[in-house]
Amino acid sequence: MFRSSLTKTYYVTLKDLKTYYLKPPLISWGIIMPLALVFAFYLKNPQGIRYIIPGLIGMVILFGSTSMEGVVITFEKRVGTLERLLLAPLSKKTLLLGKMMSGVIFGLLMGLLFLVISFFMFKLNTQKLGETLILMIFSATSSAALGMFVASSVKEVFEAMTLFNFFRFPMIFICGVFIPLEAMPSMIKYLAYFLPLTYSVDGLRISLLNQPGVFPIILNIALLIAFTLFFFWLSLIMLERRLRQE
Amino acid sequence: MENPAIEVRNLAKSFHGFWAIKGISFSVHKGEIFGFLGPNGAGKTTTLRIITGLSRATKGEAYVFGHSVSEEEIWVKEHIGVVPEISNLYPELSVLDNLIFIGQLYGLPKKERSKRAHQLLKDFDLEQKRNVLFAKLSKGMKRRLTIAAALMHKPAIIFLDEPTTGLDVASSRHLRLLIKKLHQSGVTIFLTTHNIAEAEELCQRIAIIVKGKIIALDTTQALKQKLPADNLLLIKIDKIDPSLKQKLSKLPEVKNVILEDYLIRIQSDDLNSVLSTIPNFLQQERVKILSINTSTPSLEDAFVHLTGLDLELMKIDKEMKS
């Protein structure tokens, strides 16, 4: 039963990756956007760029994992193909996990690409590569689960995009990507504690720059897992609510 | 005793206080084509969505071969195939890839799903289109592929929601032949439609649903017999005049009038009286009678008799939807 569910999850993920994600425009966007970001920040402050690299990786994962997640789910709702999945003998968890994993893989690939480029360009710590990868994986899962929750709460693609931007852009400024969390006013600092990007950036800064963070690395990982489970659970509730309402 | 293929007990569904289905109960025998007939908004699709697990009932329960839809959802989904009103396969996938993906979702082994997909493409006359994207197919082909997809896992029951809506005459005919073939292969078919002629041609038993309530459920023949056989008059005329319907309805003893181009169908409890007044009336209207016959009631006549609904309304709805 468990194996069969995993296999079905794999097929849903594979189909989504083939159909929506691994397309030339999206891949080129995934390559150009990180390069453009590095270049822009390097021109502005060549000495300070190293400090914001972990934040930029977290940000690339967030955008990579959520952008298509929202579009795919709302688009499939609109054309009726999500209903096709709901008619198949899959549990709701299998279905959502399949949908989430495509976002995770795409976001992670984009993040890894950014990481490889950054390793070549800047002196980053390679001692904690394992921790870095674990942090990147759970950054991608928490972002994709957030994307899935937003997409399952709205009906139209434009609603999903609006809601994403409402979340994502403030997150970039609040969660320590450019400005350290310690330097933030306490009210904003408390708000940042409720956002997963905070823990991605803090953890990646510890592992890649070998600097002390706000939280221990293990706590960052644990909280990213907790965010993943929380948003996944909310998405399940939204899906079940939809079945009751429609 | 063998469980019915489908059993629905006191099913009700409310949308924000509006009851779309009001406590309906029925069962579908194994191997039959069961028609669920009613105008748009009667509750047909809502019922189908609950039985197939796409929606949850507010009250009551649906069973498939004795298995509760809400409690054994996966088991039920493994044994049914659904063809929704709108063909909803993946527009970005080819015809073959769509079938293969559906096979993957239903857990068919790799060799079997490829063999089954090719067989279905052959059966549904889509073999030459196997590499064409679903989005590029004609409406009729999309419909055929959606049915083929619903059959990938060889379900025991297939649900067809308004299968011929929006199709041209030839595609509709082809589809009806496919449904008959499917039935001959032993599949139980649950057909929701507002096309009375289609239900009459295909179904062995029909439930008529209006405003969320089943008002009649019987064999097609028995439904027709609910109408006295000698109370229908068919008059063929030489010109089309839509205003005739209203004028004829006002004549004494005329219960109902259906105008179909050059044919007037009049329902009355006193045919002799109608026969004496109608010829004079039509003469006054300068309409020439080409022939007059009494007729055996059709399912359309029985539908009008049982529901009191205007058939024209059903047709307008159908045109608007397609």
Image (tube, coloured by chain):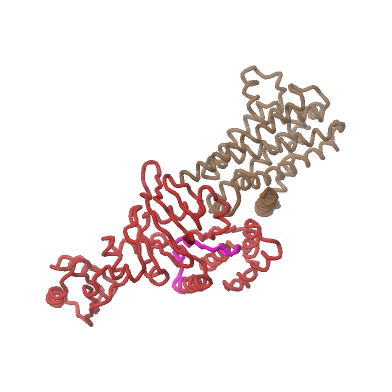
> How far across and how far down the image is residue B273, in percent?
12, 74
Left or right: residue A106 versus residue A166 is right
Task: Determine if the magenta segment contains residue B163.
Answer: yes
Residue B125 falls in image quadrant:
bottom right
Lateral position of residue B303 relative to residue B75, left or right: left
Residue at left offset 57%, top offset 49%: A75
- What's the residue at 42%, 70% (across, down)? B202
Q: Position of residue A94 (x, y in %)?
A: 63, 47
| Chain ID, red in image | B
Reply above or below: A215 against B198.
above
Residue A105 drawn in magenta: no
Residue at horizontal 41%, vertical 59%?
B321
Start-end of magenta stretch: B150-172
Q: Is residue B300 visible?
A: yes
From the image, state the color of chain A. Answer: brown
- Nearer the observer, B82 or B245: B82
In screen coordinates, is A232 left or right of A43?
Answer: left
